[in-house]
Amino acid sequence: MAKKELDIGEILRVDTGCIVGFNQSINYDVEFVGGIKNTVFGGEGLFFAKLEGPGTVFIQSLPFNRLARHVLASEPRAGGKNKGESSILGGLGGLMDGDNNF
């Protein structure tokens, strides 16, 4: 996560999913990113958040949905179930969840 201080009138445009938070003095708007190439090939990048200072903005490098996919993809799994290999408690967590198949 990054903290950015915007001066009066300074504008920051970011993917809407990258915004973590901002203070009340920030003017927030959503802008359509036009053009036929962006519309056809843009995927998630069709809208940007326009944040205008003064104030503090907190942003992350990945939109939340892509960040969540990366976190879930790195979760250790075996046979479709999380076996808790990376957990400090290991298989003990499965007992608490009612999963005895570890």
Image: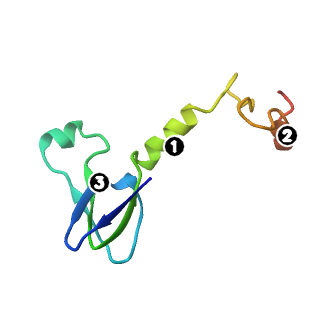
* Residue 101, image quadrant: top right
Residue position for label 3: 14
Counting residues from the start of the chain, the first of labels 3 and 1 encountered is: 3
- How dense is the environment of label 1, judged by Cα within 10 Å: few (below 14), some, or many (20 and up)? few
Secondary-structure class at tag 3:
strand
| Amino acid on which the number 3 mark rests in the picture | Val
Q: Position of residue 42 (x, y in %)?
A: 24, 40
Q: Residue at x 29, y 54 (%)?
A: 14
- Of residues 89 and 63, the one drawn nearer to the viewer in this rendering: 89
The mark found on residue 98 in the picture is: 2
Counting residues from the start of the chain, the first of labels 1 and 2 encountered is: 1
| Colour style of the rendered protein structure | rainbow
- How dense is the environment of label 3, judged by Cα within 10 Å: few (below 14), some, or many (20 and up)? some
| Amino acid on which the number 2 mark rests in the picture | Gly
User: Is 44 located above or below residue 21 in the figure?
Assistant: above
User: Is 94 located above or below residue 53 in the figure?
Assistant: above
The mark found on residue 33 in the picture is: none
